[in-house]
Amino acid sequence: MDRISGLCDELLVKILLLLPTKVAVSTSVLSKRWERLWMWMPKLDYDDQSYSEPECKNLRCFLVRSLPLHIAPVIESLRLKLSNSHFTPEVIELLVSVAVSRYVRELDISYSHHPKVSNMLPSNLFTCKSLVILKLDDEILLDVPRVACLPSLKTLQLQRVTYSSEESLQRLLSSCPVLEELLVELNDDDDYMVKFTIIVPSLQSLSLYIPYLYVIYGYVIKTPSLKYFKLKDHNSKSHYCLVENMPNLIEAYVDVEFPDIKSLVGSIKSAKRLEICSEAMYDEGIVFRQLEHLKVCRCKECASSLLVRLLKDSPKLRELDHYEMIDHYYNGTIFWNQPSTVPECMLSSLRVFNWSAYTGVPEEKDLAIYILKNANRLETMTISFDECDIPEAEMIKELELPSRASKTCQLIFD
């Protein structure tokens, strides 16, 4: 210990940063040399799940007393994951306000105890010039003042928070001129955001989740610089979805239940990688000229029709996956209608085909054989078997017998 104590303060603080905050703070009892070292730590992480009930009360008192006295000139990050009754919204408001006054760069708050959603975000948070990353989760009310400016904010995550009005989200976004990454996960219990607009010219990554029970009229998305887009809209009730073109898009993940996906599909046609699950079909005439990797979820009854349409409209496709998205369930039904003409990508560019949870039903077999017979440049077809009544050896034989358009294609069974 004497050798360590002999190191300079800067090096000791770096060592403390390798420890959980709770352990780092406990080093203050070692000696007078260590008493205040932890107060130079620029990164603080408090999670009350690791504390007993009496410890939570002590932690609250400790934070209220010590954070205003923290020595570090800049708080690089403050993470508060709190669920105990001792942490009232007023306490959290105080802690956040202090962090803002210390030029906090990253703020991560998760709160899940108070009997009702509460406003615990001080007004000075929304004019914090130093803030780069803001993450809010659970029982937090987002009430954005009319005067708001977050000039440095690049990452914003809003998970299951409640909005004071329909304007709250748009007001917050308009105060972030350099925002690059946005995640919005709506809460079933929130009845204020029945419609909303996301307009962020600088945004490069957008993830939006709308749950099944959420009451919504619709939404508009205008993000011309977007490179990554993830949309999980599980609300099947009629609502509008207006998405403007995303010419710089590289990757898209689309999992939707609503019936009209024309605007949505038209906006993502520049993507190079696409994962999609949809009951609805998009209109003809849309061409994915850059698409190279396609993953189509097979849980919908029309999945094979969507697959055929996408093959036809993706002339440069190189890799195709037929699979199930996480938490999606395939009922064993597939309707395979062989297209009248062979898609261009199968004749010239398709190299890899992967099929997960293959069951061997006749329609599945017909689709697999169609790919083998028509994909001229196919290099590998990988089949992963699901539990089924047909012996695996018999299914392998069924697929190995048909002639293949590509003589060099390897048929791999997993």
Image: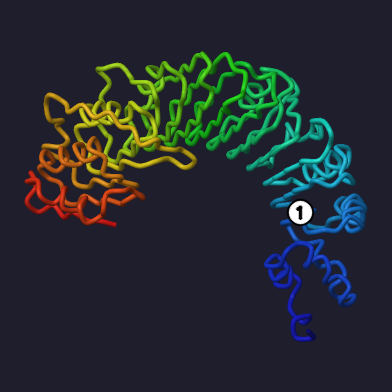
Point out residue 409 in the picture as x, y percentages from the top left corner. Answer: 13, 52
Quarter location, residue 29: bottom right
Q: How many marks?
A: 1
Q: Which residue is disc 1 drawn over?
A: 47
Q: Secondary structure at mark 1?
A: strand
Point out residue 120 in the picture as x, y percentages from the top left corner. Answer: 81, 34
Front-most of 40 and 280?
280
Amino acid at the residue labelled 1: Asp
Front-most of 329 and 73?
329
Above or below, comparing residue 390 to residue 308 in the picture: below
Quadrant (top left, top right, bottom left, bottom right) of the N terminus: bottom right
Quarter location, residue 190: top right
Q: Is residue 310 left or right of residue 58?
A: left
Front-most of 138 and 33?
138
Q: Is residue 56 left or right of residue 260?
A: right
The residue sitting at 40% across, 31% down in the picture is 277
- Residue farthest along the bottom direction in this orientation: 2
Any part of residue 297 in sight: no
Any part of residue 240 in sight: yes
Above or below, comparing residue 293 to residue 18 in the picture: above
Quadrant (top left, top right, bottom left, bottom right) of the C terminus: bottom left
The residue sitting at 11% across, 38% down in the picture is 374
Above or below, comparing residue 165 to residue 92 in the picture: above
How was this image coloured?
rainbow
**Badge 1 density bin: few <14, some 14–19, many ≥20, Cα 10 Å:** some
Point out residue 66 in the picture as x, y percentages from the top left corner. Answer: 89, 55
Point out residue 240 in the picture as x, y percentages from the top left corner. Answer: 50, 14
